[in-house]
Amino acid sequence: MAWTLAPGVGFCIAGEELIFLDLRADRYLALRGDQRAAFERLRARAPNDSDAMTGLVATGLFVRSDEENQLNPVDIAVPTADLGKRRRGSPPMRMAASAARYLYWARRAQAPDRLAATVANLSRQKRAEAGRADADAIAEMAADYALARTLIPIAPRCLIDSLALFRLLLRRNLAPTMVFGVRPAPFAAHCWLQSSERVLTGSVDDAHNFTPIFML
């Protein structure tokens, strides 16, 4: 019987650590020792005894699959540029209104008991709408959002801003990528939006300090 990652789960190897993100449980989990060895055997389709499999299944990170094992770490290149010097002046009023609306939505949507459903819904919308991966159009919209962001009295946070801009871009039929990342020592987590050419939220230096663990 084959296995795959449960919905809302991703993993990476950051430094020497094997780290999983489980959005449904709002947790990061490092597999070590016997559990890590059992997982590596599972990935290699090598035999695992019942105790080892029981321990892996108990983590909630894996589900049975009718296809071959789908147990691959996130594989995405982080761009080497960001939005750079942002435009000055007044943002378009329409953008200011949209940014405010989506930021207030994101503040609710990122709650621990809602985040997994939020991410799943956004992923479905991205697939269904088949938005354009137009890097220039995405960057222009992101720059307008960044300018409007200064007018909205919600403290900047990587997850809230990534969710808000992601949804705003999808509504404009543009398809960015949202990336969650981790750093093992000391442990820290980060989230950012990117196109094929630029990091769109936060800085490129911040993004490169983290190993991607989940993306949509």
Image (cartoon, rainbow, N blue to C red):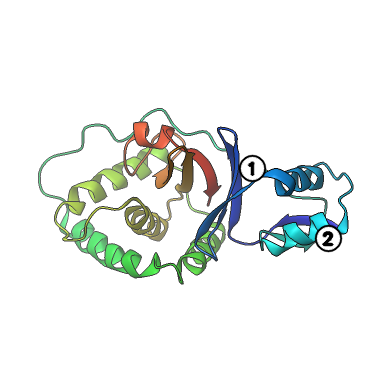
User: At x 83% / y 60%, what residue is drawn?
Assistant: 66
User: At x 20% / y 37%, what residue is drawn?
Assistant: 86
Q: Is residue 112 above or below residue 10?
A: below
Considering only order in the chain, which callout, 2 or 1, is on the residue closer to the N terminus? 2
Q: Is residue 205 left or right of residue 71?
A: left
Q: Is residue 120 left or right of residue 154?
A: right
x%, y% of residue 3? 78, 56
x%, y% of residue 43? 78, 44
Looking at this rendering, what residue extends furthest in the front direction?
33
Looking at this rendering, what residue extends furthest in the left direction?
89
User: At x 11% / y 49%, what residue is drawn?
Assistant: 90
**Marker count (numbered):** 2
Quadrant including the N terminus: bottom right
Badge 1: how crowded within 10 Å, few (<14), some, or many (20+)? some
Q: Which residue is disc 1 drawn over? A: 73
Question: Can you tell which mark lies on residue 66?
Answer: 2
* CA gap, disc 1 and disc 2: 20 Å
Of labels 1 and 2, the one closer to you: 1
Towards the viewer: 211 or 175: 211
The kind of residue on which mark 1 rests is: Pro
Helix, strand or loop status at disc 1: loop
x%, y% of residue 61? 66, 59
The kind of residue on which mark 2 rests is: Asp
User: At x 36% / y 36%, what residue is drawn?
Assistant: 206
x%, y% of residue 21? 55, 53
> Looking at the rendering, which quadrant does residue 201 occupy?
top left
Towards the viewer: 149 or 142: 149
Looking at this rendering, what residue extends furthest in the top direction?
80
